[in-house]
Image: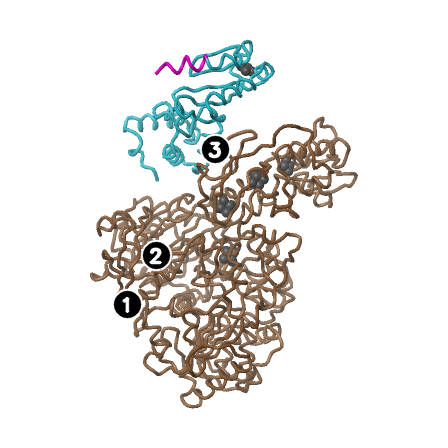
Chain colours: A brown, B cyan
Amino acid sequence: MVRLTIDGSQIMVDGNLKVLDAAKKLGIHIPTFCDHPRLSELGACRMCLVEVEGMGKLQTACTLAVADGMVVLTDTPRVEHARKMMLEFLLINHPLECTVCDASGECTLQDFAFKYGSAETRFRGEKRVLRDHIISPLIDRNLNRCIQCKRCVRICDEIQGVTALGMSYRGAATVVGPFMDKDLDCEYCSHCIWSCPVGAITSRAMKQKVRTWELEKAEAICPFCSCGCTLLYNTRNNIVHRVTHAEGRGVNQGSLCSKGYFGYDIINHPDRITSPLVRDPEGSLRTATWDEALDTVAGRLSQILEESGGESIGGIATDRLTNEELFLFQKLFRVGFASNNIDIPSGVWSRAVLPVLEERLGVFAATNSMDELNYVNALLLIGCDITVASPIAGLKVKHAIQRGGLVTEITPKGTALSRLAKRSLVVSLGKELAFVKGLIKVVLEEGLYDEKAVGGHKRFSNLEFSVKGRDLKTIARDLDLTVDDIADTAREFASAQKASVVFGETAALQPGGQDLINALIDLMILTGKLGQEGCGLYPVITNTNFQGAVDMGVDPGRLPGHVPADSPSVRKHLEKIWKAKLPKAKGMNALEMIQAASDGSLKALYLVGVNPVASFPGGSGVTEALEKLDFLVVQELFLTETALRADVVLPAVSTAEKNGTLTSMERRIQRTQRAIEGVGHSMPDWRIFSQLGTACGKEVMKYVNAAEVLEEIAEVVPYYSGVSHRILADNGLQWPFSKEDAREIYHEGYLGTRHLLGDGLPSDKQRFAAVENWETISPDADFPMTLVLGDLLFHSGTFTRYSESLNKLASEATLFMNPQTGIGLDVPEGSAVRAISAQGEFSVRVAYAEELAPGVLFIPRHFANAPAGTLMVSTREGGTETAVVRVRVVKA
Amino acid sequence: MIRSAEIFSSQEHRDMEAIVARYDSPASAILPLFHYIQKIQGYLSEDALTFVAEFVGVPHVRAFEVATYYTMLFTDPPGRHLIQLCRNLSCHVNGAEDILEKLKEELGIQVGGTSGDGLFTLVEVECIGACDLAPAVMVDGDLHGRVSADAVRGILDSYRGKA
Ligand code: SF4
Ligand code: SF4
Ligand code: SF4
Ligand code: FES
Ligand code: FES
């Protein structure tokens, strides 16, 4: 700590701080342009000049380290003169077009010119006019407004790790822009817009639509993925005009991705459904009142319940809903319709993946926090394009790399991290298991395991036996890697103090993915990488409130808190509170419901924010199944392909229009608050469920607001016991937490449990699965290739199809393949092919991508021109191929 | 990715490897590589910049920054003759501005441009060490001192004849 004096006030600060920070602590404002809290220091703009006793020249406060006894003056005539001069220099070239500039009202140059009273410059001559052009459909550049502070260039490099922008040419002609002055080809994270202190980089999406000072800002949680970013909706007259960054707030500390920043145009989209619709006897959907619509739904469902029983009614709700809503959804079904037929579209994770974690580790979630990824020394990324699947977690991995963390990526397809990671190993789908077993083999043979962790293990020899079958050379050759690729990865992982494993959809949801997860868990137990800071196992499940949905019990086989539906004690407890008999038998999952609809045993289906016609396995079979139903209710924002087939359509609202809580991928329960009133006559989903339940005669479904639902959650949902708005107030809370927990502050304001298994692995879990297979995907001669149905960075499911902005970045699917694969199939780039799976087929254009493993194909699943569901395979026996599908490709 | 073989001969590739080998960190070789490529190809094409960036392991835009910072590096094919006009102090006070205007007018181009006939590229430079002869202009390797606006056409003509 050092003591210094600034403008006569003394302060003790950390010796690593700069004078600028110390002044901030004293509440003394020093003007800056190039300094930014998220960036390294630069000292380029010289706006922050201060006088320091004993130093002749004025000093830049943003780069000057504090020192004991230092005496600083920030407000002297000399300082003021210098600042005025700097402004004058900037104003030589700045066009001063504040009247048409979107940054007006938030522009640092404008503020300082106003403060220092100098909108003029004494320097004469023509203002610089730089040749400029439109560089992107969403990000506008205006070179003449640029004050060359380099913040955009630095943030794109230091925070986003993309380095799409540079400062080219020199002197007054310096321009900020992409390589070769071309169009911007980047992640559209919006950091550059955020960082620009003037109007030189702005969002084209809000270009000259509204003045910044007319906007009100409301903090909320982003609806597009499970990172759970905090953002600010900027509204005026009940319209969301833009999103801005909530600096220093939330897990994202202000950062956003393209979806969070640009995807808001869904909210006030002109195609939103604004009132309930009921199908009239002639067969067309017509506008109805809420009373009429709810009475129809309650009446029909009650009738079907009476005639055919609860088993004949099912519901599927999107995991974008709030916890309160998901809680009421399952309560409505269990209490109102005596049915366990409830699911979310991503239920495959809660049935095929999380049970493995539950069985092996006793946890039903990712073990560690996103923040810990910032500091890992070694990281294994398997089948997870983390920049796409979980953009903010991806940023943390990029930062770990900047800090020297050794990241090894095992992927069927190059990713944004490939350039940055220590190693990016392109491995064919189904062969990742051999790689992981290779790691285990090296750890065992070189004695790199953790003695303490494996000491009591009975099945240690089994593990050794399971990796005996192949030697390292053979494994490497088969994977087209070197022995060192495997051995070094194993050594780095085992010896790192903080080592974590992140796996994604293409690893977990491939046929046989459970073996792979089991092998990964074996590796972690063997090397003692569990239950500590920085040592975690992260399944990356992108769906926004997936965790909340499983916690709330939206699952055919589990009650709130992941409790099996047939658990007598918990059921009894709930029955008492809910004053109803709860169904015992396991219900149907989403795919089984569609199947049951098609064979006539399911009579009524209630779909909330899901669009099976576009995204469920089965292609046209899904449409046919829905048409066989006696009654279909769709609760939606838009008239989707599915909603068009409904008997009743109920207009719901987006996250911006409701209050509630969401639980992110790191078990963080966060509060999100309404920014605008629901458009038209739309209602929040929780209110619809509540009114419907009441209309069905269930008094226990009556609530006045979402807060009241949370009170009940705090009472009946394990892990959420005692949760309240008060303890969620600042950045939320990570379950599990005790009442005392919730009052204390851990880790820079993080509340709750940062990582699970802190007391070590339960003794009954200390054993190895010792997977015997070497490959997960068994070859199929009819369908010799594997197709990844994946995500693009710019979209979230089929929901963001309604964002005009995001559609400007991508709006159509192409099938990506390795050029080698393409030549083998004789399909030149750009030509059309038919992709055929055991389920169905579609035709689509081909694009070549070098960074794909041979025999692996990739297609985004967001777009109507290639409906992913057509190819997904689902069998009655429970086998599904939803993310990784075996296909064959032929010329169209 | 740009494959070296698409734009360089194998000898050239070996030369560039040798250049990189002279430096502790490959990124330090970026300027020498640019000079080498400009010598053999006349300018730094997009492919060449992409190749160099990947060859030394820097983001593409970083290579572009370097290439555009130095006036003696070209990212467009230059004309047959390079006119370097000094804009530093001595030359400035001795009338470099007039010469510039005259050059722009004669060639019908702006600074950094190449004349329509492909003969001349005009760039501005800082002090070329001929202050005693200010204002000074360098065409290719030749120094022209105490240039006046009236003399500009004659100088240009003397190159128009040459190959
Ligand atoms: S949007 Fe993000 S990735 Fe693109 S240029 Fe700006 S900072 Fe870089
Ligand atoms: S565009 Fe904005 S952020 Fe970038 S250098 Fe110019 S003024 Fe600074
Ligand atoms: S990372 Fe996820 S939560 Fe954050 S802004 Fe992007 S989509 Fe939203
Ligand atoms: S803020 Fe200190 S030099 Fe720019
Ligand atoms: S100032 Fe022109 S040559 Fe030195």
Which residue does the numbered mark 1 point to in the structure image?
A839
The residue where tag 2 is placed is: A859
Please say whether residue B161 is one of the residues in the magenta stretch. Answer: yes
In the image, A811 versus A317, the foreground residue is A811
Q: Is residue A399 visible?
A: no
Is residue A337 depicted above or below A40 in this figure? below
Contact, CB < 8 Å: mark 1 with mark 3? Answer: no
* Quadrant that contains the C terminus of chain B: top left
Cα separation, mark 1 vs mark 3, equals 51 Å
User: Mark 3: which amino acid?
Assistant: Glu
Q: Nearer the viewer, residue A494 or B27?
A: B27
Q: Is residue B147 visible?
A: yes
Image x and y of residue A711, in percent = 61, 74
Percent coordinates x, y for residue A464 in the rendering: 31, 57
Vertically, is A288 above or below A135? below
Q: Which residue is mark 3?
A: B65
Mark 2 to mark 3 CA distance (whole Å): 35 Å
Q: Position of residue A734 (x, y in %)?
A: 55, 63
Image-quarter location of ligand 4 = top right
Q: Are marks 2 and 3 in contact (CB under 8 Å)?
A: no
Where are the magenta residues, as a range?
B154-163
Q: Amino acid at mark 1?
A: Gln
